[in-house]
Amino acid sequence: MKLNFAPELIHLYGPFGIHSYGLFIALGILISIIVMRQNKRFTAMHLENSYLDIVVVGIIAGCIGGRALEVISEPALYPTWHDCFALWEGGFSVLGSILGVIIIVPAYLKKIGIPILPLFDLIGIYAPLLQSIARLGCFTAGCCYGIATTSSCAVIYTNPNTLAAYGIPVHPTQLYSSALLFILFIFMYFVGQRIFTKKGELFSAYLVGAALERFIVDFWRAERIMINSYLSFHQCVALGIIAAILLINGIVKAYPKNKK
């Protein structure tokens, strides 16, 4: 299948414009918020007057974390300090964005008196939906494209302005990610809410699922940053997240608060 997507939809001024990637992220945020507001957990936490502020803080935290991990993984692409802050030029790591939210948002929640784990459990249900929609933006922009293939599912980018390899049949890894993340959302919504009842379990399940998605799809992604002959940098980060979640949950179960 040949694709002629243009990553920039509307040019505004200089380096600024409306890009398909940003449009799908905004769409993902909007849809996930609309659906999240229907959840009884949202109502029980009385988030009506604070959720927009939390979203803004989350977006900022995601941008900081996503950019930081991208710079760490590919420092050669950011030779000067101001290149690190040129966010309009793209370059974000989804795993970094997740870590940024985990590190920064709890401090804000504590400040405004919102319980951290219950809110993160709520986020864990709908974050895969947001990511699934956002990955469609990656598909239109050509970023995160796959390795060359002769399979029937291959796509060919014919617009030279996209970030993908031009004119070469490649794996549509963005669609692989989008599909897996949507499946994760379906699981979290219909199954996860029923079987993960303790505080923090839903969010932990989301983190493991999101890390597994990246670990699996990365085998077909082009321009992998290899650590060794088998694993990429982001796969190692994904494994680290999974290991950390399993370790923390193991410690919590071994030493519950009421154990004396």
Image: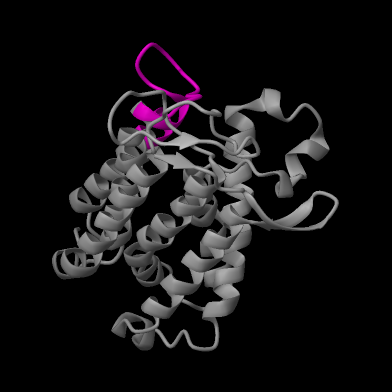
Nearest to the observer: residue 61 or residue 244: 61
Which quadrant would residue 43 be assigned to in this image?
A: bottom left
Q: Residue furthest right?
A: 14
Judge whether residue 204 is colored magenta: no
Q: Is residue 111 above or below residue 61?
A: below
Residue at position x 30%, y 34% from top? 216
Instruction: Please report the bounds of the magenta region as a residue range.
Output: 220-239
Q: Which quadrant of the rendered structure holds the C terminus?
A: bottom left
Judge whether residue 222 is colored magenta: yes
Position in image of residue 134 (x %, y %) = 47, 56
Q: Would you say 214 lies left or right of 77 here?
A: left
Q: Is residue 220 above or below residue 51?
A: above
Position in image of residue 147 (x %, y %) = 41, 25
- Tally the marks: 0
Which quadrant would residue 9 be assigned to in this image?
A: bottom right
Q: Residue furthest top?
A: 229
Residue at position x 62%, y 48% from top? 7
Q: Is residue 158 above or below residue 208?
A: above
Q: Would you say 52 lies left or right of 87 here?
A: left
Position in image of residue 87 (x %, y %) = 71, 48
Position in image of residue 209 (x %, y %) = 28, 48
Residue at position x 37%, y 77% from top? 35
